[in-house]
Amino acid sequence: MREITIPIKAETIRELKTGDTVALTGVLVTGRDTVHKWMIETFIRKTREPQGDDLEVYEKIKKILDGSIIYHCGPIVAGVETGDYEFVAAGPTTSIREEPYQSEVMHHFNMRGVIGKGGMAAKTLKACHDVPAAYFHAIGGAATLIAQSVEEVLDVYKLEEFGVPEAIWVLKVNKFPVVVTMDAHESSIHDDVEAKSKANLEKLLATP
């Protein structure tokens, strides 16, 4: 398992290939549907005027995401009432939901990667090549184990507005275990599996 520190250099991302196992250490943020939609509408396509603390939050996360990673995750968090945050479960969310937004978000924030489960499609794969970045597959069903990689909750944004699962959690992680399943060379394990599965299905259907 290769250990990589966040922020990640572009050269490091280009060295990675699909199938590589990686342990990530550093600062990353969580973001699901609401966060991606907010980023796109308010700051990238600018179809919505900034409101409330939008500009302040944007400036803070822009610095964090430069060379970093967004994690598709809706965590279960203890201590929300007191502010003594502790991640109880931090499993990955199905990433394909963010496909309409992810490429633009990766380019805009100069991100080095996305963590999630299930893989993503052609636009995100091309962004992985162009930015460059990688898609890191986290283990579905291991939410409690992954939460142990979260050393500290450094901050949280949009908690009251978006709610716990959809808020922007800023996390310090230590040896977060992932597998590269989409790399900067436009290789995708998810596409390979889909193609093989389709071929096998066609063989079965053609069998008399």
Image: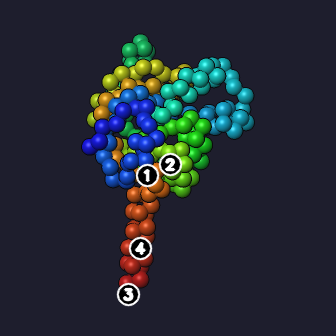
> Where residue 199 is drawn, which disc sits there?
4
Q: Of marks 2 and 4, which one's residue comes earlier in the chain? A: 2
Q: CA distance from mark 2 to mark 4?
A: 26 Å
Image depth: mark 1 or mark 4 in front? 1
Residue named by callout 2: 128
Residue named by callout 1: 182
Residue named by callout 3: 208
Q: Of marks 3 and 4, which one's residue comes earlier in the chain? A: 4
Q: Give 52 or 162, whichever is nearer the viewer.
A: 52
* Position of 128 relative to 166 (above/below): below
* Position of 198 relative to 89 (above/below): below
Q: Of marks 2 and 3, which one's residue comes earlier in the chain? A: 2
Q: Considering the image in quadrants, where does the N terminus appear?
A: top left
Give the residue furthest to the front. 11
* Position of 96 relative to 42 (above/below): below
Q: Position of residue 70 (x, y in %)?
A: 47, 36
